[in-house]
Image (cartoon, helix red, strand yellow):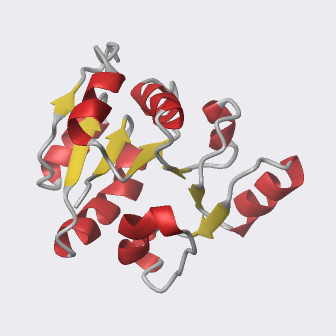
Amino acid sequence: MKPLLAIVRDIMSARMIIPLIKLARGLEIPVATIAEGKAVGECKDAGIELLAEGTDEFTLFANPSKVFDQLNPEIICIGCSYPINWELQFAEEARKKKIPVAAFADTWGCTKRLRGLNPEFAFVIDEFEAERIRCKKEAFASLIIGDIASTTNVQISSGRMDALNKIV
């Protein structure tokens, strides 16, 4: 089975994606996690093993393309951190390789940091943010409201999203 690849940078994006990682592992879906900044500590505290980690200086990852070639992930899950760094680099590389992207928006308006990337899924914090995205006509295929831990009954229809469908 292809892995889920999670990329996180700050505390809140880590806190949104860590429950997804735990759900995936519980379903025996392989997960690779790359963290930088404050997310490194959050992941380690949650017992998440890291494929790679950065420092608080947010150094650039050497080669996202090489990581994709080695892992061949089913989907990548990113935060919308500020400043956005690896999350966006990996999402842009996923686009080139036609790998679906799920973005986790931990605050109002943070999806604008994706610079028009338009992921297949956006997990948003509340209906207000979902409506803001709809009004701005940001082209996300699916909006999911609430944190991942509370979305266990959500069904997402797309053949390429088998791994994410099993989780949510």
* Residue occupying the far right of the picture: 135
Task: Please report the residue visible at 52 percent of the width from the left and 30 percent of the height from the top.
Answer: 96
Residue 157 x/y as whole percent: 57, 75
Say which residue appears at 24% left-offset and 20% top-offset.
55
Q: Residue at x 15, y 51 (%)?
A: 48
| Residue 147 to residue 94: above or below | below
Identified at 68% across, 59% down, the residue is 141
Residue 67: name its quadrant.
top left
User: How many marks on residues?
Assistant: 0
Whether residue 154 is situated above or below residue 52 in the rendered picture: below
Q: Quadrant of residue 66?
A: top left
Horizontally, residue 61 falls left or right of residue 140, namely left
Q: Quadrant of the C terminus?
A: bottom left
Where is residue 37 drawn, in percent x and y? 31, 28
Q: Quadrant of the N terminus?
A: bottom left
Q: Nearer the viewer, residue 46 or 99?
A: 99
Residue 121, image x and y in percent?
58, 57
The image position of residue 13, as x and y in percent, is 42, 47
Q: Quadrant of residue 57?
A: top left
